Image: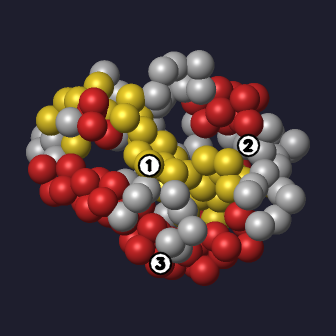
Amino acid sequence: MSLDLVRVDDRLIHGQVVVGWGRELKPDLVVLADDEVAANEWEQKLYALGVPCSMRVEFATVAEAARSVDAWAHDSCKTIIILSDIDSLQRLCNDAPIIRKVNLGGVHNDGDRQQHLPYLFLSEAEVGQLRLLATRGIEITAQDLPNSAPVTLEDLL
């Protein structure tokens, strides 16, 4: 399977993803699955600037990404999927049951969230969504960088 990382990070493509995870995983493809960015060429150009030329970047809605996950997972191309929020993650996992492992990166406070790690704030609704995904056998860990120890959902909550 070549789906190397499915990550929730509200900053989308930034240094931790490109430098930290990129150097560790050496992906060929970075997929930014976000409905708003997929509809905005200007934002796509900005995010593409942050991706080194050794990696391809694709922009997709969450629904488009869900339809492509199986192909990405069985391709020899190493792929990272980045989502902006837990709701998008749940939609992706609902429509792409092949996803069995998820990484929670930066999810920042919006006033309604409680802090669980220095880089991870979750609302009650988001906690419920993550618990539901976990009951379906999806391994959920929080890890800001590849050299940090992953924190399991159980330990997180």
**Residue contact at pointers 2 and 3, CB within 8 angstroms:** no
Could you tell me how far apart the alpha carbons at marks 2 and 3 are, in whole angstroms? 27 Å
Q: Position of residue 137 (x, y in %)?
A: 40, 58
User: Counting residues from the N terminus, which is met first, the one under dot 2 or under dot 1?
Assistant: 2
Front disc: 2 or 1: 1
User: Counting residues from the N terminus, which is met first, the one under dot 1 or under dot 3?
Assistant: 3
Looking at the picture, which amino acid does disc 1 mark?
Glu
Residue 84 or residue 73, whichever sits in front: 73
Task: For mark 2, give the secondary structure.
Answer: loop
How was this image coloured? Answer: secondary structure
- Residue at image position (27%, 37%) is 154
Q: Is residue 52 left or right of residue 73?
A: right
Task: For mark 1, give the secondary structure.
Answer: strand
Looking at the picture, which amino acid does disc 3 mark?
Asp
Quarter holding the C terminus? top left
Report the residue marked by disc 3.
95
Around disc 1, counting alpha carbons within 10 Å, would you say few (fewer than 14), some (14 to 19), or many (20 or more)? some
Looking at the picture, which amino acid does disc 2 mark?
Val
Could you tell me how far apart the alpha carbons at marks 2 and 1 are, in whole angstroms? 27 Å
Q: Position of residue 118 (x, y in %)?
A: 31, 22
- Residue at image position (60%, 80%) is 67
Residue 129 versus residue 106 in the image, above or below: below
The part of the image, by quadrant, that contains residue 98 is bottom right
Report the residue marked by disc 1.
139
Around disc 3, counting alpha carbons within 10 Å, would you say few (fewer than 14), some (14 to 19), or many (20 or more)? some
Q: Position of residue 28 (x, y in %)?
A: 82, 50
Report the residue marked by disc 2.
51
